[in-house]
Amino acid sequence: MSDFFYAGIDIGGTTAKVGLVDNYGSIIEKTQVKTLKTGNWKKIIDDYVKPIEGWIKSGKNVVGIGLGGPGAFDKNKKMLVTCVNIPELKDAPIISYLEEKFNLPVMGDNDATCAAAGEHIFGAGKKYENFLFVTVGTGVGGGLILNNSVFRGRDGFAGEFGHMTIVPDGLLCSCGNRGCIESYASATAIINNIKTGIQRGTITTYGDVDLADIDARLIFTKAQAGDKDSINAVDNAAKHLGMIIGSVINLLNLDAVIIGGGVAQAGNYFIDRIKYYCEQTAWPSFMKGLPIISAQLLNDAGIFGAASLIIEAQSEKH
Ligand SMILES: [Zn+2]
């Protein structure tokens, strides 16, 4: 255990996970705080940081605070400029408020970017200088580590992998565009694929299962057991993901691709299918020796990721 600690706050619509990470990648304190529905951003933030104040009072040497938020984080304005789940935090000066309150470095970023930073510092991306992190869950998100640091782009919005267009005039996405990869490859898309087939009567292998009980886990289990319709649904998602990841590999000549999120936790089956389709798009010389692997940080990925923002910033200064 080191004698100094990084605080991480993983902000979510219903709760925030708050923790302290040491230099060696151990979480030494963690707790959950309910997201208040008060309409007042200061009260929400004050509640999130109460545990950190307690840890500092008890003598823990906290050297910085990182926040991961569910929205687009503007690096110049230092605020979330979209935050659908917690509208109170949109355009609120949370970073400068906390810097003043704690007199410590405070950084924030989008939660998928935080997850990429977390994998880079503590997880599957430790030994890679250039990698794409893709998270596949309810939606599809991403983060880029280039030249050993988080790539943020002009405003800080870089890494919106889920909204790369794969099908011209394709399915309508939650962002308003058509044909985004998220509409074809998220857990939601895989589940919808099966449900639609059942409703149309083209999929009959799910028997009497209630539509509401069909989740990604069930579909993956059935696919691995050889059910053709489930294999097709998973394969359709993997094909779209693999093709876009392959294109990104051709663009950036990456060292690795790391896949995280709920669907990726289903194991190697999905990742192997992504890899198969990736190899159809990326040039062989780019794919040679390029690992496509699962994320390592699972339950506490958000805390690790947020804390990693501070570690990243400090290492860039050196
Ligand atoms: Zn979109």
Image (spheres, rainbow, N blue to C red):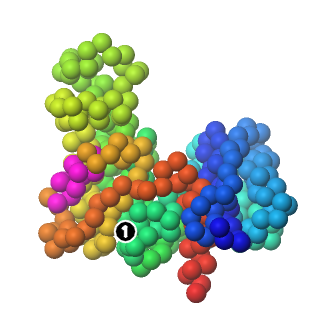
Report the front residue among 132 and 77. 132
User: As drawn, is 188 to the left or to the right of 236?
Assistant: right
Q: Residue at x 24, y 63 (%)?
A: 247
Q: Residue furthest bottom?
A: 318
Judged by its main secondary structure, the magenta piece is helix
Residue at the spot 17% in from the left edge and 54% down from the top edge: 276
- Residue 202: give x, y in percent of width and height: 18, 21
Q: Quadrant of the N terminus?
A: bottom right
Q: Position of residue 17 (x, y in %)?
A: 64, 48
> Which residue in the structure is indicated by mark 1?
131
Position in image of residue 318 (x %, y %): 58, 87
Q: Residue at x 50, y 58 (%)?
A: 115
Range of magenta residues: 270-279
| Residue 85 is inside the magenta segment | no
Is 35 positioned to the left or the right of 155 in the image? right
Tell me if residue 81 can be seen. Answer: no
Quadrant for residue 29, please give it: bottom right
Element carrying mark 1 = strand
For the residue with label 1, is its CB less than 8 Å from the closest atom of ligand 1? no
Q: Residue furthest front?
A: 1
Q: Is residue 296 visible?
A: yes
